[in-house]
Image: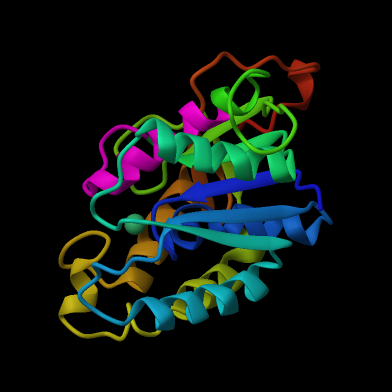
Amino acid sequence: MRLEVLAVAAHPDDAEITCGGTIIKLTERGKTVGVLDLTAGEMGTLGSPEGRLREADEAAKIMGLAVRENLHLPDSALTDAIDNRRRIAAVIRKYTPQTVILPLPEKQRHPDHRMAAIAGYGACFLAGLAKAEIEGEPHRPTTIIYASSFLEVTPSFYVDISAQFERKQQAVAAYRSQFDGSPQSKMIFKPGTDIMELLEIYHRKYGVEVGCRYAETFWIAEPMLIDDPTALAVRSL
Ligand SMILES: [Zn+2]
């Protein structure tokens, strides 16, 4: 099985929340997309690891994922240790994605999100080293994009998810144990905020900024080359 896109996330539900609309848009277009969750979220106040994995499977179906794996690294103790990078790199070699989606390394409240970004980037590099002692043939993704939704950075680009927003909500709602409306459930992503409210407010705000109903935001570290400046989906006036 080859993947065109692999999203690496710290906890089950992170990929849904930060870039689920874009993942759904890609799978609707026939792209093969997978998610690698690094932990099972076992330190979460709500739910059990087994329950969260079941919910992750349900969300995977809603998003149309070709594959979803979990490395079972320690939740809330995630590091970018070389062994962790090797394990992520083995998954990259197994599925040979050209595009990898990572959490943004900066401005993260949860340290695991930052570590997932650093370990994920290190793994992309490591996976391409012929002499690295990792299972599989060397493979290095071409493009890394960072999911920046909800974080105070200037995005490099926005993805219109207006047509996918409802399915994104369904994928997030699949995590019933996490987002049950209880006071604890409102402490998970942005303290004090209901997740569905958060999605509505932020994705609508991003949509307003680019002239569509709902959007997700991404940041890239490198300059972007385009072929035809007249085809830019930019509304200046
Ligand atoms: Zn998380």
Q: Nearer the viewer, residue 161 or 175?
A: 175
Name the residue: 37% across, 72% down.
196
> Residue 157's x, y, as percent?
55, 33
Residue 90, quarter of the rendered image: top right
Q: On the image, which quarter does residue 100 sit in?
A: top right
The extreme front residue here reads 133
Q: For the image shown, how many numbered marks are present on the structure?
A: 0
Q: Where does residue 202 sit, x and y in percent of width and height? A: 38, 55
**Residue 194 coordinates in the image, percent (x, y):** 27, 73
15 in relation to 178, above or below: above
Residue 201 seen by the camera: yes
Which one is in front, 165 or 73?
73
Residue at the (78%, 26%) spot, across then down: 231
Q: Is residue 153 above or below residue 209?
A: above
Residue at the (74%, 38%) spot, across then down: 96
Which residue lies at the image location 50% right of the left edge and 62% below the top edge? 16
Horizontal and vertical percent for residue 104? 39, 37
Q: What is the magenta range?
A: 105-124
170 and 174: which is toward the camera: 174
Splitting the image into 4 quarters, where does residue 127 fall?
top right
- Is residue 76 rendered to the left or right of residue 66? left
Judge whether residue 131 is colored magenta.
Answer: no
Q: Specify the quadrant that holds the C terminus.
A: top right
Residue 129 lies, with reference to residue 159, above or below; the image says: above
